[in-house]
Amino acid sequence: MSEIEQQLNILNAVLTKNPTDADALYQRGSLYMKLGNLAAKSDFTASANINPKGPGATALTLVSDIIDFYHTDLYNP
């Protein structure tokens, strides 16, 4: 098991106990980004909804810009 997978398991356990932990959501989203997993956007969105001034909000803006640029057919109306 890779270090990222181990970290994801830990964060998943934390979020099972406290699904509104904005920092854990942000951290898990960051790990998903390292893996190239677009599920990161969901975690950043949840984190930003809980803490609009936290790092999740900034990350959401950045990942949205990346997705809009690279995947215009997937997420643009």
Image (cartoon, helix red, strand yellow):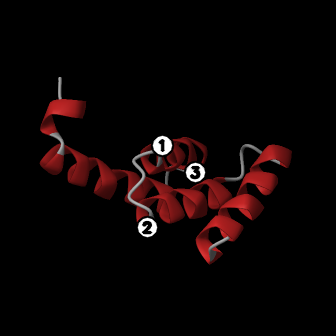
Q: Residue at x 38, y 58 (%)?
A: 36
The residue identified by callout 1 is 45
Query: Which residue appears farthest toward the bottom when viewing the image?
Result: 3
Three-letter code for the amino acid on which mark 1 is drawn: Thr
Contact (CB < 8 A) between labels 2 and 1? no
Dot 2 alpha-carbon crowd within 10 angstroms: few under 14, some 14 to 19, many 20 or more: few
Three-letter code for the amino acid on which mark 3 is drawn: Asn
The mark that comes first in sequence, 2 or 1, is 2
Dot 3 alpha-carbon crowd within 10 angstroms: few under 14, some 14 to 19, many 20 or more: some
Q: Residue at x 51, y 48 (%)?
A: 48
Q: Quadrant of the C terminus?
A: top left
The answer to whether 67 appears left or right of 47 in the picture is: left
| Picture coordinates of residue 18, whole percent (x, y) | 81, 47
Q: Is 75 located above or below residue 17 in the figure?
A: above
- Using the numbered discs, state the Cα–Cα distance from disc 2 to disc 1 in whole angstroms: 17 Å
The residue identified by callout 3 is 51
Query: Which sits in the foreground, 25 or 2?
Result: 2
Query: Which sits in the foreground, 42 or 4?
Result: 4
Query: Which residue appears farthest toward the top when viewing the image?
Result: 77
Query: Which sits in the foreground, 61 or 77?
Result: 77
The mark that comes first in sequence, 3 or 1, is 1
The residue identified by callout 2 is 34
Query: Which residue appears farthest toward the right when viewing the image?
Result: 17
Three-letter code for the amino acid on which mark 2 is drawn: Lys
The picture quadrant where one finds residue 5 is: bottom right
Q: Which mark is residue 16?
A: none
Residue 36 appears in the figure = yes
The mark that comes first in sequence, 2 or 3, is 2
Dot 1 alpha-carbon crowd within 10 angstroms: few under 14, some 14 to 19, many 20 or more: many
Secondary element type, mark 3: loop
Q: Is 17 located above or below residue 26 in the figure?
A: above
Secondary element type, mark 1: helix
